[in-house]
Image: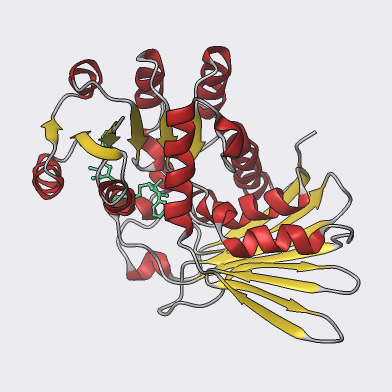
Amino acid sequence: MTLRIGFIGVGGIAEVHLRNIAATDGAQVAAMYDVNPERLQEMAHRYGCAAYDDMQEMLQQAALDAVYVCVPPFAHGEIEFSVLEHGLPMFVEKPISIGEDPARQILDTIESRRSIVAVGYHWRYAQAAQRAKERLAGRIPAMVQGYWMGDMPMVSWWRRMDQSGGQLVEQTTHIVDLARYLLGNVREVYAVFAQRGMQDIVEGVTVPDVGCITLRFENGAVGTISNTCLLNQGYTVGLDILTRDAILEIRGDGLTERTTAQTVIYRNQENPYLSEDIAFLDAVRSGDPSRLLSTYKDAFLTQRVTAAANRSAASGRPVSLD
Ligand SMILES: NC(=O)c1ccc[n+]([C@@H]2O[C@H](COP(=O)([O-])OP(=O)(O)OC[C@H]3O[C@@H](n4cnc5c(N)ncnc54)[C@H](O)[C@@H]3O)[C@@H](O)[C@H]2O)c1
C-alpha cells in the first residue's frame, strides 16, 4: 500500500521531507496546504500533488494516511489539534511551540488518543548519536558542553522573539535535545542572554544574539550550552560529553572519541533526515511507534528546558524543572 502523505507548511525544511518522501517506495506526496499561495502553487507543481488553500478541506478530502507539519514555531496549535481530530499520524518539525503551551495541551490530546506522532529532532537519528550512546554504556558522563555558533537564518519570523522564541528555542534546541537523549532529563536551568549587535544590523531583531545556559541533569551531571547568531560565518555546532577516560565530540558529520590511547573519528554514513522519515513512515505503516527516536513526549521534555531557559533569562534566576 502506498502511503498518501499531506503537508502543512511547505517552506525550507518541508523540502527536505518532500524530497525524501518523493524518493521513497511505498509513499507519495498527495496534498499540501500553506498560507503562502505562491509558494503552495510552486511546490504543488514541483511535486505533482493537490494544492489546498484550506487546511480543513485537505484533511477532509485528500484521503491522507499521515501529515507533516512544517510551520514556524508561532503557528503551532490549531494545526495539530485538527490533524489529531482527523485521526491522522503526524510528523511535527521542531520546535513544537514557543513556550510550554500549546505543546502541553497537544501532548495531552496525543496521549488520550494514542496517536502516532514523531518530531524532527534528527540529530538523534545520526549514527554519531547512536555510536555515542554505545560508547557511554558503562561510563559516567560527568559534564557536557554544547554549541550553536553561527549566523542568523534570514527567514523573517526567526529574528522576532514572539514568533520564533529565540535561538535557544528555535535552533539550539537540537543540542539541548541531544544532551537529553544521551544524559537524561534536566533538573535545573539557568540562562543569561544578551544583544550584542544584530539589532543594529538587521531591522526588527528582538531575539538575543548571544546566550549561555547552565544545566543540572537528574543523573547529577552538569553542563553548559552556548549559542550565538551574531557571527558572519559558520562556526561550531555540536555537543561534547566528558567522562573520566573518554571525551566524545558529536558534530553534524560524525563523532570523535578521544582517549589517552587514541583518537577515533566515526563519520556518519547515512542521512539522519532520511532515517527519521523512514522511521516515521514505518511507524505509520505498522501502527507501531516503538522505533521512533523522538516522540512528541520526548520533544515536550526538551521544550520544557528551552522554555525554562527563556524564563530564567527574563528573571535572572535558576528555574527548577522538578
Ligand atoms: N530539523 C531541522 O533541521 C530544521 C531545519 C530548518 C527548519 N526547521 C524547523 O521547521 C520549521 C519551519 O522552518 P522553515 O525553515 O521551513 O521556515 P520557512 O519560513 O521556510 O517555511 C515555513 C512555511 O510555513 C508556512 N506557514 C506559516 N504559517 C502557516 C500556517 N499557519 N499554516 C500553514 N502554513 C504556514 C509559511 O508560509 C512557509 O511556507 C521551524 O520550526 C524550524 O525550526 C527544522
From the viewer's perspective, is 28 left or right of 188?
left
From the viewer's perspective, is 156 left or right of 119?
left
Percent x, y for residue 260? Answer: 87, 85
From the viewer's perspective, is 60 left or right of 168?
left
The part of the image, by quadrant, that contains residue 131 is bottom right
Residue 128 seen in the figure: yes
Q: Is residue 183 above or below residue 85?
A: below
Percent x, y for residue 120? Answer: 47, 45
Q: Residue furthest front?
A: 1
Taking the spot 59% from the left edge, 43% from the top edge, the residue there is 293
Taking the spot 11% from the left edge, 43% from the top edge, the residue there is 48
For the residue pair 242 and 155, the one nearer the viewer reads as 242
For the residue pair 276 and 308, the one nearer the viewer reads as 276
**Which quadrant would the C terminus be assigned to in this image?**
top right
Taking the spot 15% from the left edge, 46% from the top edge, the residue there is 47
Taking the spot 81% from the left edge, 51% from the top edge, the residue there is 216
Colour mapping used in the image: secondary structure
**Which quadrant would the N terminus be assigned to in this image?**
top left
Count of number-bearing discs? 0
Percent x, y for residue 107? Answer: 55, 24
Q: Is residue 110 above or below residue 49?
A: above
For the residue pair 110 and 190, the one nearer the viewer reads as 110
Residue 318 seen in the figure: no
For the residue pair 63 and 315, the one nearer the viewer reads as 63
Percent x, y for residue 278? Answer: 44, 45
